[in-house]
Image (cartoon, rainbow, N blue to C red):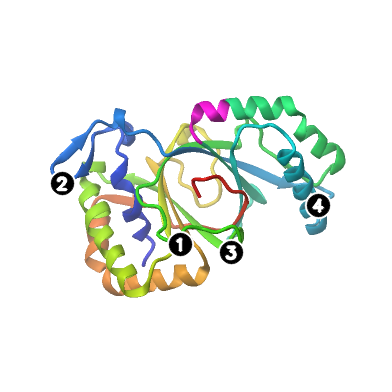
Amino acid sequence: MIKSLFVMLVIGTLIGCSPAERPVETSAGEETSAATREPDRYQEYLWCHNGPNYSKESFDASQTYWQQMVAESDLPSFGHFSLFPKFDESNFDRIVGLIWNDKASRDAGWAAYIESGIEENLQDKFPGVETCAGDGSDELFAVSVYQPRPATVAMDDQESKGRIASYQFCTYNEGKEGSDLRPVAVDTYGAWLDEYETKNGATGYSWAYFAPDFDPEASKASDGVPNAYDFVWMNSWASESEESLGMAAYAESGQEIQASFDEIITCSDPLRYDVEINIRPATL
């Protein structure tokens, strides 16, 4: 599967007025207002920077201590994961991802976290190891997440490491919008994916569509991210081997599908990350 494969996976389920608020076709001949299509969850991405006292040992110890404090607290439920770039990146060393049920849960969760004093305790015990963006920072990026098709093989508790996530930043070509993508993304590519899993077995592959809850043109951007884009999509695999097999199969049999997508959208090259799940919510 060449780079634009990722386009196919997520677009059709959310169309917007920025492109995320236009009507969404949910099945052939059936339309529903985007106002009735709620996001599946709300996520935040926080840039983190290694400090002068960083080492693998000090970082691992700090994360163990942080997770212990969270487990012993009465904070609202949330998910937490780490992204480690598989490419040269000058803006951060790690990204922390936070998973919330919705934006209201996010607001309540941050208020409770600030009140808990956990962050201060962490920095007191492990000074100069790492600093991460906090609430209100310009290095925090929030998105509404729409996930049309979860993985057919659910992640178990032993699979906290070894996963791969890939992100691309996409704009509609002139005269195109989400409704142009839906038949290809959901129906045509969905059929291809069904056939692939029929032949090769169920996979841990999943995708999601991200509607930015910020202005990309007025925000910081990491290396490889364009200054402007309409939406982001994410692909996740259980392993690098699963990623390689799927992409090879698509490169062999998906050329016509790919040509259809190339007429509709233009996307950045994928940014790939190693993923470590630290606190797993029910949505993963």
The answer for how far apart the CA atoms under marks 2 and 4 are is 52 Å
Residue 28 is tagged as: 2
* Left or right of 22 in this view: 151: right
Q: Earlier in the sequence, mark 3 or mark 4?
A: 4
Q: Nearer the viewer, mark 4 or mark 1?
A: 1
Spatial distance from mark 1 to mark 2, Cα to Cα? Answer: 27 Å
Residue carrying label 3: 162
Give the magenta range.
101-107
Within 10 Å of disc 4 (Cα), the crowding (few <14, some 14-19, many 20+) is few
Whether residues under marks 3 and 1 lie with C-beta atoms below 8 angstroms apart, the answer is no
Q: Which residue is mark 4?
A: 61
**Marks 3/1: CA distance?**
12 Å
Q: Position of residue 274 (x, y in %)?
A: 58, 59
The residue under label 2 is which amino acid type?
A: Ala
Whether residue 177 is visible here, answered yes or no, is no
Residue 275 vs residue 212, the one in the foreground: 275
Secondary structure mostly seen in the magenta stretch:
helix
The numbered mark, 3 or 2, whose residue comes first in the sequence reads 2
Q: Which residue is mark 1?
A: 204
Q: Position of residue 25 (x, y in %)?
A: 21, 41
- Would you say the residues marked 1 and 2 are in contact, meaning their CB atoms lie under 8 Å apart? no
